[in-house]
Structure formats: structure tokens, C-alpha cells
Image (cartoon, rainbow, N blue to C red):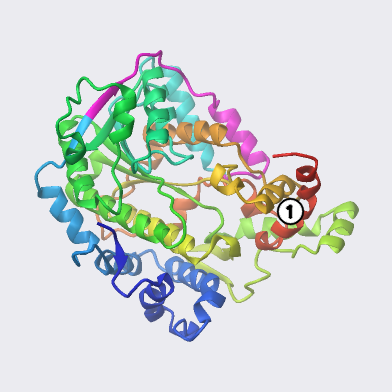
Amino acid sequence: MSLRFASGPSSTKFAVELLGPYLPDLKLGAPGEWRQNYQRAFVELTRLEAQTSETRLQAALLEAIGASILDDAGRSITQLVKQGWSQGQLVETVVVSGMGETSRLATVGKPTADALVHNGLAEPRIADDLSAYDDWVAAHDEAPTAGELLLAIGANAELSLVADWLAIGGIAAAIARQNSTKWSALIAQARESGGTLLVPVLASQAAGLDLASIDDEQLAQIAGLDLQADLAAIAGWVRSIADAHIDKRIVALGTVYAPGKNQILAAAAQDALLARLTDELPPARLVLGWLATPLDSVALPREVFEASIAAHAKRGLGRRIRDLLLRPVGGPLAPHPEATLTSANDRELAIVDFSAVRQGSSYLLAKRIERWRAQVAQAAGHNVWFQVAPPAQTHSTLDYRVVRAAFRGAGSFGVTTFVPWMLRDLLTAVLIGHLKGEAKQPVNQSAKQPVEPRALLDSAIHGGVWRVAYDPQSIWSPAAILGWPELLRGGK
């Protein structure tokens, strides 16, 4: 089984039919308009989201997505998840128990937060989460994951937090497609840790096998579930995990990644699962989490915008000369001057577009699906961890030589890219702090009580992207020029 758009194979047609009715002035359906204006479309959507604390727009778009992505039999992903939740068990669970010592994260809470904020790499509220992490670890001997179960969707992604969660003694249920090499590595990490990994195996794959006696290499060959091919089975497995661990809060963390239009399909399937969890579990038993991108259009407090403009005005002579040669554009609003200051809940906001053309429209739409669900879930009283994570030196990113060069030169413009293992450690500490901190528990218990969408971005770790003195889209080519000589000398 595979998933497809009801509108046909084109992701452009799907996006235009989904968003066009809400953005009539952009005329997205005209030939070539989507590819030329999709970044502008997401800017306009950000403006609509920021103008009100209600989430009716986001909920309507999510409902449309759930109804307009179908399987081969014509069933929507919403129907698939609903049916899978109530049908018989199609997945077996293999428990991989760690045989190592429980370790601690390398991140030091408050000092790390202070350094991130001081260097313009994160927003101030990150200190709340990392201080809460510090305080809890200092006061307790047991694993900080006690009472929680990590449901990791996209568990084999390079920025998945599963290995770190296991290392500190946690229990993790992993959802990732079959890939014996990646599963073998994850199972080995689980064995070396002080945690417990729950591995799904399709019943059809387990037929005739004694799962209790197979070795780890055999398990890696048959482990895994595919969000497109096995969505109903995944829903049933998630329910079984929730039922079997009734004493634990489910921390559902989505980190799916796929190329091209498959990113939309994967994000939509993930969203259908998370939507079912919000329907079935009370807020006290569920935390929803995502790793968001800073390279998107966002509504930021006016002071962040003004700080970026001020930084550009304060450049020294050397940087001014460099900028005359490389021609980065000053100020984050340069490509979209029509994205003017607006107001939401009596806060002055600036609609700023940090997206990059290289990302493509499918990626931006997939990440917006996650943002919409975060906003809707928070408005309904659920605890949400929507963590903006900085550019990372992952293999999928560094496959492109020009990107490697740009990452090397980005520091010259105020953008810091992170090594994956260090970033995973930091993000796990932030997540733990979020779970332990009182300040970010569910903010309202009624869907009628408004929630400010901007609050989801207050703890962003953006690597400097949101506070650089330039339009971020304009720095990547100059950064690649600066970083290219090192690649030519044999740098990786």
C-alpha cells in the first residue's frame, strides 16, 4: 500500500487546491504562479495565523489534508488511522533491554542557555527549560524519564532523540521504516544503554519465528513499520503501547523526513496519528513534540526584528567592504517589504520570512502541517513541545557540496550550524526540562480559551538565523563562496 494525493500525482496541484481558497489575491492556480510565489504564500499564511489567537484556519487545513490523502483503496489517512486504532493487533512488540549503565547528558543547563542567548543563537525562554532540567537533575537520583514513554515517529532520523533518551534510562517505542543497517545500529545503542527499546515487527514478518529467541541481527532484518505502507497497523500498535503503559505519559515526538513530495505524505500520515492520540488520550497523558525549522516564515516580537536591523547598521568597516563584494541583503524583511508589522494579543509582531529556495515547497508545507497541529493541540489544552532546532550538519544536508561550503562560511554572517550528536544531547535536555518545568505545562483546559501562536516559538534555538544582520536567504551564496576554499583544500 502507498499513499497518494486525491488531486493527482502533483504536489503543486495538491498545495494549490489546499491553500488557494485562503489566498485568493495570490492567484496560485495560474500557470507557474505556485513555483514563483510559494514562499510568499507561506508568508501570507503566517500573517493570517498571527492576526488571531483562534486556530480555526489551522484546524480546517488539517482536516482537509486528512481527507485528501488516500491509500490505494481510496481510504483517507484519517479513516486509516481510525480503523487501525480499533482493529486487531497487526504488529508484534520485541522488547530490547539495555545492559549498560544509565548515563547523564553532556549539556549543562543554565550555563548552556546563557551562552546560547548571549551569542544570539536562541531566544531567552530556552533558559526556562534548561534551568528546569538542571534543577530536576540536581534534586533527583532516578532517571529523568521516569513516568514517561517516548513514542518516536521517524526514530532512525539523524536528529531523532531515541538514543539519548535510552542512554538516560528511558523507555522508547520506535516507529521507522525497515532498514536493517539503521535498525541494527539503534538496537545496538539500546543494548549498550540503561534504557528499554520497544521494536515493532509486522505480524506477517514474524510468522513462524520465535521472537523471544531471535538475536539482534535477525531482529534488525524484520523490524520496522512504514508510515505510508503500514499506517493502519501503526495506529493499532500505538494504541497497544498506550494501553500497555497506562501508568506512563506518552511523549509523541515526530521527526519524519523524506525527499520531495513524500515529505508531505509522511508529515500528513504522522499528523493523522498525532490527531488520533489527541482524541483518545487526555491532556494529562500526552505531550506532543516536533523539531521545527528556523528557515520558515514566522511572527516574531518586534524587538527581535529591530535587533537585526540595528546589527546591520553597526557593522564594522571590514564587514561593510566584504558585503560590498559579496552583496548580502541587509535586513530580514528585504525580500518581502509587504510583510509589515502587525499585532496579536496586544503584542507587536513582525512577519519575517527566513525560508530558503533550496528547501522547496514540499518541505515548507510539511513543516507547516506540524506547526498547525502544534497550534491546534495547544489551543485544546495539550502540552506541546514545538522546538525550533538550528541548522545541523546531518548527512542528508551535507550530501550537497555547495551546502557544505555554505555551512562552513555561514559563521561569517552570524549563523552557527550544529554537529548532530551535540545538538541531540542539547535537545534532549531541553525536552526533559520542558517535561519537568511548571511554566510550560498545558496552558488552558478549554478549547475556547485562546492561545497565542507566537508562544510556540519563544524557546527557539535558531543558530542565529533569526538575529543575523541580513536577509538570511541572501547569505547562503556568499557563505558558500567563503567556505569553498576550505573544501578545495580537502575539508569535509
Residue 171 screen position, x and y as percent = 31, 27
Label 1 packing within 10 angstroms: few (<14), some (14-19), many (20+): many
For the point 27% across and 54% down, the residue is 380
Tag count: 1
Residue 475 falls in which quadrant of the image?
bottom right
Is 223 rendered above or below residue 28?
A: above
Q: Depth check: give the residue in front, 185 or 246.
A: 185
Q: Quadrant of the N terminus?
A: bottom left
Identify the residue under disc 1. Answer: 480
- Position of 65 with respect to 352 (left or right) is left
Residue 353 screen position, x and y as percent = 58, 64
State whether residue 348 appears in this view.
yes
Residue 136 screen position, x and y as percent = 42, 24
User: What's under tag 1, amino acid-wise?
Assistant: Ala
Q: Is residue 103 magenta?
A: yes
Which segment is the magenta one?
94-123
Residue 173 falls in which quadrant of the image?
top left
For the point 17% across and 48% down, the residue is 280
- Position of 416 with respect to 269 (left or right) is right
Residue 326 screen position, x and y as percent = 82, 61
For the point 37% across and 54% down, the residue is 374
